[in-house]
Image (cartoon, grey):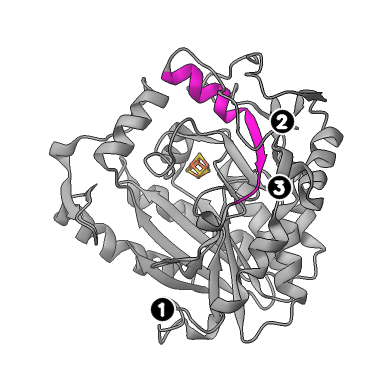
């Protein structure tokens, strides 16, 4: 462990286009107890974060995971990571964990339709390398993974929002979920769990805290290392969803994540541990043979989840879209990607504040929108369909 605020020496670079060199250490199989576990090549902790118990817990976890390059900063400013070009800066950032204190502006709850009443963040950034990443365009600067050390303060900030939601709380179909809090908008919380412990601490908090009304924690992941979650006293107040996709989409574009069969198997383990669970099918793409491919995905989920006693399963269906900014960033990160981001093949859709998204044209959207819910109902009848977007 070193103490410095100077720029750090560059680690060996992961190749963002090579799924076998993602900076993610993995024990390489899909059996229980396995799954991809991220080891940052460098950890930096700010002075204020190092004073907090959860910051110290993250350091302990990093040291236990064998991270040798841990830097105690002498201030709360993160040094430049370096990198001569966007690709090098990307690779450096994606292998770095910064432990910081979330300021009040980052702790302000935001509505997050159509998923949940409120969004809150345990961290910002993700160690995986999905070539369509939802975070592109949302993050500023290189995508260094920032984990928040003031977790108790973040969790205490949720209490005033109980009973205040305007998304699921006002939905006739979903009101029974209670006030919903989404923790995976800006990170994959399970992807960094081994070195942060933040997701387990949050699940335990939701399970035991004396809330003013019904609540639900929501998190989605592309990682299968769920074992630390299985023995937590979750109280049925956490819904974990696996983000899954057709074989051609996941195989081509999901770098540094657990394989889809391992994700489904992990979801089965969570369901058998009494968690409400879900499938986040995203981003849906009309690849060659999409009906067969997504049908096989639902069949595989049925084989794993169909016999789970008391199964509480939801499904969220999200089509692929991009913005001019996310396209630009993704092409910097993945210059050789074969992901289709052709404005001429898409329809423009304006968001609430006039921002333009490029979505699939109306005929194919209508075809998919008709097919997916009925295929889901037929092949995975236990799944409660939440929304299509
Ligand atoms: S798992 Fe999610 S957040 Fe992480 S790289 Fe993939 S799309 Fe981005």
In the rendered image, which residue does mark 1 sit on?
Answer: 166
Q: Nearer the viewer, mark 2 or mark 1?
A: 2
In the rendered image, which residue does mark 2 sit on?
Answer: 73
Q: What span is in magenta?
A: 86-102
Corner quadrant of residue 343: top left
Q: Nearer the viewer, mark 1 or mark 3?
A: 1
Label 1, secondary structure: give it. loop
Q: In this view, does 222 lie to the left or right of 4?
A: left
| Mark 2 / mark 1, whichever is N-terminal | 2
Whether the residue carrying mark 1 lies under 8 Å from ligand 1 is answered with: no
Residue 357 is situated, as x and y percent measured from the top left of the image, at 24, 49
In the rendered structure, are the residues bearing label 3 and label 2 in contact, judged by CB atoms less than 8 Å apart?
no
In the rendered image, which residue does mark 3 sit on?
Answer: 193
The crowding category of the residue bearing disc 1, from other C-alpha atoms within 10 Å (few below 14, some 14 to 19, many at least 20), is some
Q: Is residue 311 left or right of residue 250?
A: right
Query: Where is the N terminus found, in terms of image quarters?
Result: top right
| Mark 3 / mark 2, whichever is N-terminal | 2
| Mark 1 / mark 3, whichever is N-terminal | 1
Q: Is residue 213 above or below residue 383?
A: below
Q: How many labels does the image show?
A: 3
Q: Can residue 287 be seen in this view?
A: yes
């Amino acid at each position: 462990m070193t103490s410095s605020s100077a720029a750090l020496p560059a680690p060996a670079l992961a190749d963002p286009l090579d799924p076998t060199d993602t900076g993610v250490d993995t024990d390489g199989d899909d059996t229980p107890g396995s799954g991809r576990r991220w080891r940052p090549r460098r950890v930096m902790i700010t002075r204020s974060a190092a004073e907090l118990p959860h910051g110290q817990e993250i350091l302990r976890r990093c040291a236990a995971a064998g991270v040798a390059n841990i830097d105690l900063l002498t201030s709360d400013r993160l040094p430049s990571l370096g990198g001569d070009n966007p690709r090098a800066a990307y690779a450096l950032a994606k292998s770095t964990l910064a432990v910081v204190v979330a300021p009040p502006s980052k702790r302000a709850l935001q509505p997050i339709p159509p998923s949940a009443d409120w969004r809150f963040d345990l961290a910002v950034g993700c160690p995986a390398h999905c070539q369509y990443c939802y975070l592109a365009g949302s993050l500023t600067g290189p995508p260094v993974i920032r984990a928040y050390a003031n977790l108790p303060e973040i969790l205490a900030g949720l209490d005033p929002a109980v009973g205040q939601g305007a998304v699921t709380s006002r939905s006739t179909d979903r009101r029974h979920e209670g006030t919903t809090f989404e923790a995976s908008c800006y990170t994959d919380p399970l992807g960094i769990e081994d070195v942060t412990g933040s997701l387990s601490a949050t699940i335990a908090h939701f399970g035991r805290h004396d809330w003013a009304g019904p609540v639900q924690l929501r998190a989605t992941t592309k990682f299968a290392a769920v074992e630390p979650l299985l023995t937590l006293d979750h109280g049925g107040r956490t819904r974990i969803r696996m983000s899954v996709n057709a074989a051609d989409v996941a195989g081509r574009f999901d770098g540094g994540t657990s394989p889809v069969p391992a994700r489904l198997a992990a979801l089965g383990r969570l369901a058998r541990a009494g968690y409400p669970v879900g499938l986040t099918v995203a981003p849906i793409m009309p690849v060659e043979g999409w009906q067969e491919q997504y049908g096989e995905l639902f069949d595989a989920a049925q084989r794993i989840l169909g016999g789970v006693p008391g199964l509480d399963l939801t499904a969220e269906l999200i089509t692929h879209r991009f913005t001019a900014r996310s396209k630009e960033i993704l092409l910097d990160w993945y210059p050789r990607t074969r992901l289709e981001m052709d404005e001429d093949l898409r329809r423009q859709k304006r968001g609430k504040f006039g921002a333009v998204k490029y979505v699939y044209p109306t005929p194919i959207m209508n075809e998919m929108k008709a097919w997916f819910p009925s295929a889901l109902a037929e092949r995975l009848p236990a799944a409660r369909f939440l929304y299509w977007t």
